[in-house]
Image (spheres, helix red, strand yellow):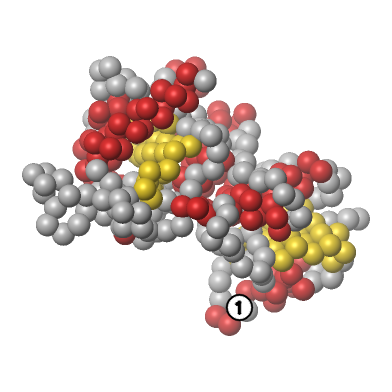
Amino acid sequence: MKRTLFVASNRLGDAVLTTGVLHYLLETESDIPITVVCGDIPKSIFEGVPGVDRVIGVKKRCLSLHWPEVALSLGPVVWHRIVDFRGSLLGFLPARHRHIWRGGKDDIHKAQANAQLIGLDKPLPPRILPTPSQIDASGKWLGPVDQRGKIMALAPTANFYQKQWHHENYLRLAKELTAKDGILEGARIAVFGAPGEEAQAMPVVNALPKEQVIDLVGKTTPMEAATILSQCDLFVGNDSGLMHTAVAVDIPTVALFGIGKPTVYRPWGDRSLCLQSAPPGTPIIRPEGYSDLNRAEPLPLERVLKEVESFYVRITEK
């Protein structure tokens, strides 16, 4: 029996960005089941995908000893195809077709680079497809499907503090956009964040009216977060895995970039907006000595508010 081995990233964002390739293989080689190897954090986004028959979560060990352990658990298989985005030892297992990541390029987006790994010229954007049962289960946080109304998603966290727009900016942005005559008037606000990211996210949660805020900080798996995001009307967040997840479920997505590589990691597609600090590459954290009087921020609230409003109106008018 033919089988494909798909080795994805340990990080949520990079793992999400490989889902376009995964779905392409599932559609073009629908008779070949796929085994996914990935980090424990993104594991849930691959579980339950039709055509994926096994998902192995990897915890890193010293001297890369996790790879021999995974190889042993896979058993003696001659793989039809190995697609390895980690450039790991698993790429050397017996296979008829082999696609091994040799390092990224800083001049093209990951959606393009990932597709090129399997020999395609067209980009393969990330795709996460929540099932009807997963959408129903999101009622735990959002309420019944037919009573949810508009929801704005905020992700004020990131894996590095210099990528984090200040929580006060997120709070004021959310209040402006959901106020009377705002583009999302009366919308509830879903605040996302992983365990350990409470310091940046909870000030937003705690400052919003209890009847308006949906507190999801540290409370969901990545797939649960993706399902909830699929029910939202707009996402605004830092350069993070949650931002790529929002793109993958095809909702209007605004990403706030400072340091990082927007050419490679900006949100992909026509339904996205990438706002960069000025000058580009400047951390989007508030600089020392900031005050409301001088408003000396690399990514000012007023600019973000104006551009988000214009973007959302343009997207919803299409």
Q: Is residue 183 above or below residue 56?
A: above
78 vs 308, left or right, is right
Location of mark 1 (residue): 64
Quadrant of the image containing the N terminus: bottom right
For numbered disc 1, what is the local secondary structure? Answer: helix
Position of residue 274 relative to residue 41, above or below, is: above
Q: For this rendering, which residue is in front, 159 or 113?
A: 113
Q: Residue at position x 30%, y 31% from top? A: 306
Could you tell me the amino acid type at mark 1?
Answer: Ser
Residue in view at x 47 percent, y 18 percent: 317
Residue at the extreme bottom: 63
Q: Residue furthest left?
A: 293
Label 1 Cα neighbours within 10 Å, binned few <14 / some 14-19 / many ≥20:
few
Whether 211 is drawn above or below 5: the answer is above
Q: Could you say which is closer to the camera, residue 61 or residue 124?
A: 124
Corner quadrant of residue 42: bottom right
Identify the image quadrant of residue 116: bottom right
Q: State left or right for residue 31 relative to residue 60.
A: right
Residue at 60% across, 44% down: 126
Estimate the x, y position of residue 273 in percent, counting from the top left.
44, 38
